[in-house]
């Protein structure tokens, strides 16, 4: 198990930080995709956004905890 990160005296688990970063990055990517008209090609925008957020979360969690990306995505 990984240790917590100290943010101003509050200990935060790295997976929580990864979740917040993944949400912010997914929103920025979603904004860019909507500006380019990419979502016209997507069947279900909400499902696409959730899947993108989960994939980003797994990638950031693997990066922050020092694990491998394939283990984070596959299980």
Image: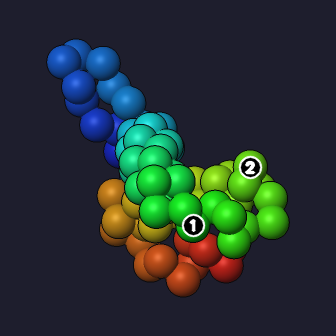
- Viewer can see residue 51: no
Residue drawn at point x = 57 percent, y = 78 percent: 71
Q: Residue furthest left?
A: 8
Question: What is the secondary structure assignment of the residue under circle 2?
Answer: helix
Residue, disc 2: 46
Q: Residue 63, labelled with which disc?
A: none
Q: Position of residue 35 (x, y in %)?
A: 45, 54
Left or right? Give the position of 40 relative to 22. right
Residue 66 placement, left or right of 29: left
Question: In the image, is residue 5 above or below residue 51?
Answer: above
Q: Position of residue 24 (x, y in %)?
A: 41, 42
Extreme-bottom residue of the structure: 70
Rendering coords of residue 52 (x, y %)? 59, 61
What residue is pinned by disc 1? Answer: 38
**Mark 2 surroundings: few (<14), some (14-19) or many (≥20) residues within 10 A:** few
Task: Work out whether 25 lies above or below 38.
Answer: above
**Regarding mark 1 in the picture, which secondary structure is present there?**
helix
- Looking at this view, is 35 or 15 the one in front? 35
Q: Where is residue 14 shown, x and y percent of the image? A: 39, 44
**Farthest-out residue, top:** 9
At a point 54% along the width and 83% down the height, the residue shown is 70
Quote the CA–CA distance across marks 2 and 1: 14 Å
Nearer-the-camera pick, 3 or 21:
21
Is residue 8 left or right of 22 when viewed as pictured?
Answer: left
30 or 13, which is in the foreground? Answer: 30
């Amino acid at each position: 198990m990984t240790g917590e990160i100290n943010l101003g005296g509050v200990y935060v688990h790295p997976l929580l930080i990864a979740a917040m970063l993944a949400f912010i990055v997914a929103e920025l990517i979603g904004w860019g995709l909507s500006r380019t008209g990419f979502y016209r090609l997507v069947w279900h925008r909400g499902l696409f956004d959730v899947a993108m957020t989960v994939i980003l979360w797994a990638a950031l969690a693997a990066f922050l905890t020092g694990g491998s990306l394939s283990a984070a995505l596959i299980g």
